[in-house]
Amino acid sequence: MNNNEKLLNVIRALEALTASLKDLAGSEGSSPDTGEKETNERTVTFEEVRKALAKVCAAGKTDAAQALVKKYGGDRLRDVPPDQYADLLHDAEAL
C-alpha cells in the first residue's frame, strides 16, 4: 500500500468517525454547534416529593412539612410548581 492509499484510508476513517459523532450528537437531543448547555440534573417527580414529606410528617414534623410547601408557593403540595420540586425535596430531606 503506497502513501496515497494510506492517506485515503485515513480520510475515509475520519469521515466515518465524523458521521458517527454527528449521529450520536443528534440522537441525544442537541447538536454540539447549537450552544445549548446540557445538564446532568434529573427531574424530581411529585411522588418523590410526596414520599419525602410523608417521612417528615411521620417523624412528627408536620408543621415543618407544611411550612416547606408554603415556602415553595402552595397551600397543598399540588399547588407547588414542578420546577420547585427539586429544591423542596432537598429541603425536606434536610429535616
Image: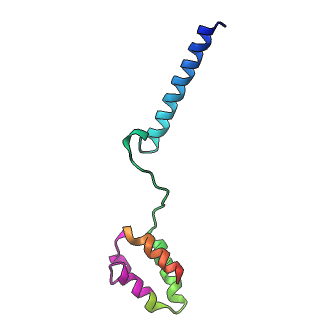
Q: Position of residue 86 (x, y in %)?
A: 45, 70
Q: Residue at x 44, y 39 (%)?
A: 26
Q: Position of residue 33 (x, y in %)?
A: 40, 39
Q: Residue at x 44, y 76 (%)?
A: 88
Q: Position of residue 55 (x, y in %)?
A: 53, 83
Residue 76 within the magenta-colored segment of the rendering: yes
Q: Residue at x 42, y 50 (%)?
A: 37
- In the rendered image, the vertical position of residue 72 relative to residue 4, given as above or below: below
Residue 39 within the magenta-colored segment of the rendering: no
Q: Position of residue 2 (x, y in %)?
A: 65, 6
Question: Is residue 46 visible in the rendered structure shown here?
Answer: no
Question: Is residue 77 visible in the rendered structure shown here?
Answer: yes
Quarter of the picture containing the N terminus is top right
Q: Residue furthest top?
A: 2
Q: Residue furthest front?
A: 3
- In the rendered image, the vertical position of residue 75 relative to residue 31, given as above or below: below
2 on left or right of 24 = right
Helix, strand or loop for the magenta stretch, by majority? helix
Number of marks present in the image shown: 0
Task: Tell me the colour scheme of the image.
Answer: rainbow
Quarter of the image where one finds residue 72: bottom left
Quarter of the image where one finds residue 34: top left
Which range of residues does the magenta coloring cover? 65-82
Q: Residue at x 37, y 82 (%)?
A: 71
